Image: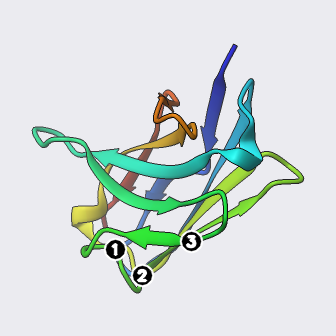
């Protein structure tokens, strides 16, 4: 059974930082691409950051330079360090795991709210 459990969300002021974590089980973690999507109220879900099994990263233009995705294969965990947060970063953030064959899984999500 695949489980992706996100943590680390919360309320932060504009300009602040948060670090999200996603603990994965039931997947071949080291072989899977991992990522983070987000969905803001009234908007479509969008890719935030992505990291391949080999460690190559890709970011949405809106998060490039502010967010950093990383993975620890020894702990089956992927991280998203978010700096210089803006109000428009407010969303539910979802962890994703994609197999070599293109099958994707998502976690339940963690709320990030950026507000003063």
Q: Quadrant of the N terminus?
A: top right
100 sits to left or right of 26 = left
Q: Give the answer, above or below, for where 110 lies relative to 15.
A: above
Q: Residue at x 47, y 78 (%)?
A: 83
Q: Residue furthest bottom?
A: 65
Q: Give the answer, above or below, for where 116 lies relative to 16.
A: above
Q: Where is residue 21 drawn, in percent x and y?
A: 65, 51
Q: Where is residue 97 drawn, in percent x and y?
A: 55, 39
Confirm or deny contact between disc 1 and disc 3 (CB under 8 A).
no
Per the image, the residue denoted by label 1 is 63
Q: Earlier in the sequence, mark 1 or mark 3?
A: 3
- The residues tagged by marks 3 and 2 sit, at their Cα atoms, a distance apart of 17 Å
Within 10 angstroms of label 1, few (less than 14), some, or many (20 or more) residues? Answer: some
Say which element carries label 1. Answer: loop
Q: Quadrant of the C terminus?
A: bottom left
Nearer to us of marks 3 and 2 is 3
Q: Give the answer, above or below, for where 111 lies relative to 79.
A: above
Q: Inspect this view and state whether residue 79 appears.
A: yes
Q: Residue at x 64, y 33 (%)?
A: 5
The figure's colour scheme reads rainbow
Confirm or deny contact between disc 3 and disc 2 (CB under 8 A).
no
Confirm or deny contact between disc 2 and disc 1 (CB under 8 A).
yes
Within 10 angstroms of label 3, few (less than 14), some, or many (20 or more) residues? Answer: few
Per the image, the residue denoted by label 3 is 56
Per the image, the residue denoted by label 2 is 66
Q: Residue at x 71, y 36 (%)?
A: 24
- The residues tagged by marks 2 and 1 sit, at their Cα atoms, a distance apart of 5 Å
Q: Residue at x 55, y 66 (%)?
A: 18
103 or 96, which is in the foreground?
103
């Amino acid at each position: 059974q695949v489980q992706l459990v996100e943590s680390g969300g919360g309320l932060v002021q504009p300009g602040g930082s948060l670090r999200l974590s996603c603990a994965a089980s039931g997947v071949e973690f080291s072989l899977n691409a991992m990522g983070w999507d987000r969905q803001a109220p009234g908007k479509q879900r969008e890719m935030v950051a992505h990291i391949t099994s080999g460690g190559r990263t890709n970011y949405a233009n809106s998060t490039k330079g502010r967010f950093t995705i990383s993975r620890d294969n020894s702990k089956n965990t992927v991280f998203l360090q978010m700096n210089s947060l803006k109000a428009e970063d407010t969303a539910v953030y979802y962890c994703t795991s994609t197999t070599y064959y293109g099958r994707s899984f998502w976690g339940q999500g963690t709320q990030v709210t950026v507000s003063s």
